[in-house]
Image (tube, coloured by chain):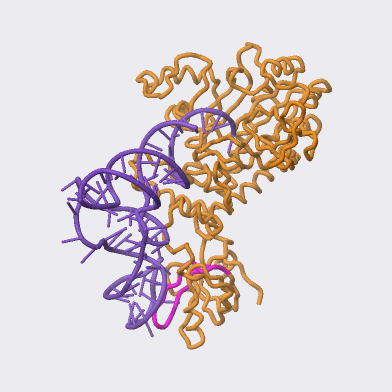
Amino acid sequence: MKRTEIKDLLERADFGSKVNVKGWVRTKRGSKNVSFIALNDGSTIKNVQLVVEMSPAMEPLLEKIHTGAALSVTGDLTESMGSGQKVEVHATDIEILGVANPNDYPLQPKKHSLEFLREKAHLRYRTNTFSAIARIRHAMIFAIHKFFNDRGFYNIHSPIITGSDAEGAGEMFQVTTLDLNNIPKNEEGKADFQTDFFGKATNLTVSGQLEAELAALALSKVYTFGPTFRAENSNTTRHLAEFWMIEPEVAFCDINDDMDLAEDMLKYVIRYALDNCKDDLEFLSKRLLDEEKNKKADERSMELIEKLNFVLDNDFERITYTEAIQILRNSKPNKKKRFQFVIDGWGADLQSEHERYLVEKHFKKPVILTDYPKEIKAFYMKQNDDGKTVRAMDVLFPQIGEIIGGSQREEEYDKLATRMKEMDIPEESMWWYLETRKFGTVPHAGFGLGFERLILFLTGMGNIRDVIPFPRTPLNCEF
RNA sequence: UCCUCCUUAGCUCAGUUGGUUAGAGCACCUGACUGUUAAUCAGGGUGUCCUAGGUUCAAGUCCUAGAGGAGGAGCCA
């Protein structure tokens, strides 16, 4: 008999029909005459209730059914007599596809800590929290592609292995087929990459931006959505060594268009989540309330769905770095020296505490900071006429901090080449990038969105390791 | 990489100023119950108190080192 997915089954009202459901047992409970099994198949966060009347045939089966077991159940779709659900399935035939020995199966019908589940990442999909996150994550992947496709963008597969070591976005993972126990050396006594697979030193990409720029300067509107690797020894709730990044790049576009695009995209995908992931968001909202119930009222975060609507209903605040410094310099925590790093002059990079003050205390909504000092930003950013600042734009979100980093790009050959020299970027390995400024250069802009940071915000989770299935962080590459 | 905190039963956690045989809930097993909603009720046994040293008459508790984990900072998305 053809399987009905639980998501569809719960919408049906053709009571009396024979149905088949397959899934994994969440809980089993019961009395002498009747047992109830909550079955989940991942199609929705909701379970279907199986009702099993005790009989000589059923009894030995029920003894083998515990939390975690996989079942195929055929029975009658029935209007539920209980109060927790509208429909249920009265089982007439149960096949145990896979048992789960309760002495060994680590998941119980109770609350587990996120840390415990992180160590059971192969099984944590079977929990409400992680299945909800997985479904929302999928919806966001789809929504991002839809957003760009609907606006005429082309998706670009930027390379994962790169021969350029000048992307300037952090420490890189080396890619090599050399025998690490017997590394061939050149005359200088260093590793001889000429004998390596590509004949040169190669790494995993830290950004698809430079390649996206090449594509944008022909296709006008492109975006990448791929894995990104940073070998930084970062141990925080918002950094991963392997994460996914969305990087749109648009020709004939300045920093203001870039900010509009970033704000439109974020609002579009948040709206998409509210429209398509209601059950999962409601569950995660309750989870968050429960997790924070012991916190003081002023330390609790805004209710999840309210927070998402709040972002939709408000324009992001757009201010320059210089204006931000003014605000921070005059702020209470700065005057009372409550910041760990007191703001006293122009030019210093903003610390997390400053960004959080601007977003969470001063403006109380997402903030886009622009026009940073050129010294603290990357070489490729468009230089302003003041000679001091560049057209960078960072989108800051509450709790998450920087969710997007972007800029208008320097399209003038001379200015770009000069800046590269100043910052010791080797021109010879970047000749292809510079050539785009030699031949038909145009103003263009783009940004990078950290996908997992978006999912953190949408799900209300606190640790980025819980919004990617198999997190890679320093000293952790299990699974 | 730096700072702070944590590690006790399969899971979540309690364990007093160092003092007898280390506890609870859940899970599991047995029994009760005519429909439950993380069912309920009664009973059952479960420990390398992270590891290695040390102090002490006595260490889960104090000290040192190490391992693992978490939070914050930096780097950034």
Nearest the eye: A232 or A379? A232
Quadrant where the N terminus of chain A is found in the figure: bottom right
- Note whether residue A9 is visible: yes
Q: Main secondary structure of the magenta part?
A: strand
Magenta highlight range: A23-39
Q: Is residue B63 left or right of residue A273?
A: left
Q: Is residue A451 one of those drawn in magenta?
A: no
Judged from this view, the residue extending furthest toward the top is: A386
- Chain coloured purple: B
**Up-down: is A106 above or below A304?**
below
**Up-down: is A218 above or below A86?**
above
Nearest the eye: A453 or A431? A431
The location of residue A275, given as percent across then percent down, is 57, 50
Q: Quadrant of residue A184?
A: top right
The location of residue A73, given as percent across then percent down, is 57, 76
- Chain coloured orange: A
Nearest the eye: A437 or A268? A437
**Up-down: is B12 above or below A223?**
below
Residue displayed at 79% across by 40% down? A197
Q: Is residue A131 left or right of residue A108?
A: right
Q: Quadrant of residue A473?
A: top right
The location of residue B46, given as percent across then percent down, is 35, 67
Residue displayed at 66% across by 12% down? A385
Residue displayed at 69% across by 42% down? A181
